[in-house]
Image (spheres, helix red, strand yellow):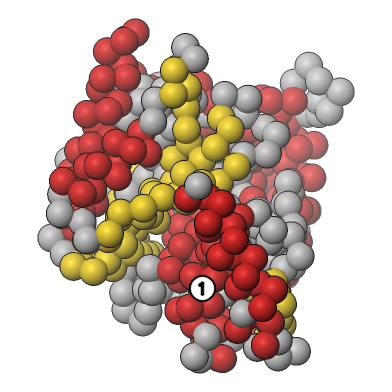
Amino acid sequence: MENTQALIDIMAWITEGEYTSNELRLFEDARQLYELQLAKMEFLNFSTNLDEFIKRTAYFEEVLGKKSWHYYISSVKGKGQIGHTNQYMTHWFYPYKGKFHGQMVKALINFANARNSDVVLDPYLGSGTTLIESSLLGLPGKGVEINPALAIISQIKLDSLGISYPDLSNVLTPALVNEAFKYFKNLKVQPNSIKPTVEEHLNARELLELLWDSYFPRSPLHELPFEWRNFLMLVYLHALSDYTYLKGTRKEKSLQEFFHEDLQEYLRTIEGTYNVIHKLGIELGDYDITIGSTLSLPYPDESIKAIVTSPPYSIALDYIKNDEHLLKYFGIDISALRDQMIGLRGKGKEKLVLYERDLQRSIEEMIRVLKPGGWAVIVLGDISINGTRTNFKDKILNWGAELGCSEVFALERAILGGFARLRFEYLIFLRK
Ligand SMILES: C[S@@+](CC[C@H](N)C(=O)[O-])C[C@H]1O[C@@H](n2cnc3c(N)ncnc32)[C@H](O)[C@@H]1O
């Protein structure tokens, strides 16, 4: 019933409302109900300022004959991209399973009305989607991630937005590229030498500097700027993932072949990103990534304007198994990490109990750090376990209400194809 009414409202808005009279054009692939709902929210927040509307909105392709910035940004295509939704610019770097869509995240930041120096937080940062979007919107972003390897990857994806393609391409000779491949391939780190240092609140950039200083022996690569060295490292990690997953399939190749192929595609992205950022004059927002836990966020009360995040979907995905090759490459202590990861702690039935407790605790932390009036938007799949729906959406809405949130509601997003156990995802909105 609720959905039917929402559908009627949206149809009315599209067919006869202000939307048409303002000569706006939605991207033609923005057709799911939740996308139209988010487009309407963007419209309501930005329709009085044409300049902001063009620069910020995620679902509009055109207004008064002018293309939106999202049109150009999403035209820097990445591997696996669907329409204007995901994988554009550096979003596609490193094939992390469980990314959410940049376009949707942008619309959620817009809905939360973050402007100027308002801080955007993702306390379950994963591969950095939220911070890439906040940075492209010129907003300061903060991220917390328990897995040091993902914190590093996110940092490199963000730093890569600012790489000067003309300078990089001038320096990358075939000899240097071969040297880089050999260097990363021969790197031997001590197993379990990195433990997740949650209490230390180490910053991802500091961790990368520490890695180069203490684990990576000196080589000609050290002459390159920090961001470029890291960029090459990320290409190697991408190749390592391709090599691990495609071994034994028709797409199998050597690690070196993947490295060279991936490098060419990464460079195309850096070129496109550089061109679009300069053409539009995008001023990237700052970002800061902490290796830490959502159970105890390293921020003062009432310091964050908007949270856009996606916690692990209950016990549905084993995030550690998916990235084992990566964790081993960096010598990260896997069992220490597993003990601190939400959804992976405990055995059998205890696992779900711990998941619920940890999730609730993390929502309390999010509400604590939010400014009054600020929004937390939590994207969560509707998981069934042994045929029973877990219904964490309703639990989160209840926790939000108990914590004194002034508004709580959810939108439904149908998952088309893909992950069989997951038919819906929810966008859960809590306003402090
Ligand atoms: C669904 S993924 C987030 C994916 C992200 N939205 C993206 O687009 O890449 C959930 C993330 O939560 C992280 N995580 C699990 N337990 C955590 C904890 N206690 N503190 C912080 N992050 C945690 C996992 O390592 C994983 O990267």
Tell me the residue at 25%/22% (across/down): 354
In the figure, is residue 296 to the left or right of 178? left
> Mark 1 sits on what residue?
42
Please rate how many residues cluster around mark 1, counting C-alpha atoms within 10 Å: few if below 14, some from 14 to 19, many from 20.
Answer: many
In the figure, is residue 102 to the left or right of 175? left
The answer to whether residue 40 is visible is: yes
Q: Quadrant of residue 396?
A: top left
Residue 317 place in picture, x, y as percent: 49, 25
In the figure, is residue 172 to the left or right of 158? right
Tell me the residue at 69%/66% (across/down): 74
Badge 1 amino acid: Glu
Image quadrant where one finds the C terminus = bottom left
Considering every residue shown, the one lying at the far top of the view is 348
Tell me the residue at 38%/68% (across/down): 112
The answer to whether residue 213 is visible is: no
In the figure, is residue 381 to the left or right of 270? left
Residue 117 place in picture, x, y as percent: 32, 78
Residue 361 place in picture, x, y as percent: 20, 38
In the image, residue 289 sits, relative to residue 364, either above or below, namely below
Which of 368 and 49 lies nearest the eye of the viewer? Answer: 49
Tell me the residue at 79%/45% (across/down): 261
In the image, residue 49 sits, relative to residue 45, either above or below, namely below
Residue 45 place in picture, x, y as percent: 45, 79
Secondary element at image label 1: helix
